[in-house]
Amino acid sequence: MADHTAQSIVINAEPEAVMAVIADFDNYPEWVSAAREVTVEEFGPDGKPARVRFDLDAGVLKDTYVLEYDWADDGSSVGWNLASSKLQRAQRGRYTVVAQAAGSTKVSYELTVDLLVPIIGQLKRRAEKAIINSALHELKKRVEG
């Protein structure tokens, strides 16, 4: 992913457990602080969510957007692209999980967001870093919970 922001964290769980939480969109409002409502609109032939609508309220940033997901056959990653949004021109992201020693998993998150409102690159990357940091720590807390 060109011009993206990325960060990783180690979670004390197997990769399958991490991916199960990532795929459980119906329960995102319980652990993703900015998610008000998350609805799976379409499932793929493999039974995994393929199109998901998010109602997000992150204080000054409120948006309703739809993401289309692509799940790796081997369960090692999931990527997404923006299908529609009120505030975003584009969004691309990916979670990748890699088994580590002693039943832990390294989770990497890559994200690129392009807003309809112009924003300078440094502020955009800072916002992406904040989103990723929050998402990874909330995921860790949920999985290890």
Image: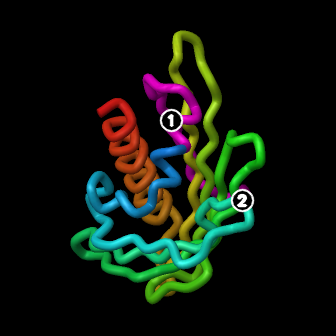
Q: Residue furthest left?
A: 59
Badge 1 or badge 2: first in the primary sequence: 1
As drawn, the label of residue 94 is none
Q: Which residues are magenta?
A: 1-19
* Horizontal and vertical percent position of residue 37: 33, 73
As drawn, the label of residue 17 is 1
Seen in the picture, residue 86 relative to 80 is either above or below; the reply is below
Seen in the picture, residue 4 relative to 96 is either above or below; the reply is below
**Quadrant holding the C terminus:** top left
Cα separation, mark 1 vs mark 2, equals 18 Å
In the rendered structure, the answer to whether residue 88 lies left or right of residue 34 reads right
Residue designated by label 2: 46
Badge 2 crowding class, 10 Å Cα cut-off, few under 14, some 14 to 19, many 20 or more, is few
Seen in the picture, residue 138 relative to 92 is either above or below; the reply is above
In the rendered structure, the answer to whether residue 79 lies left or right of residue 136 reads right
Q: Amino acid at mark 1?
A: Ala
* Horizontal and vertical percent position of residue 71: 69, 55
Q: Amino acid at mark 2?
A: Asp
Foreground residue among 112 and 70: 70
Badge 1 crowding class, 10 Å Cα cut-off, few under 14, some 14 to 19, many 20 or more, is some
**Quadrant holding the N terminus:** bottom right
**Residue located at (58% from left, 32% from top):** 15
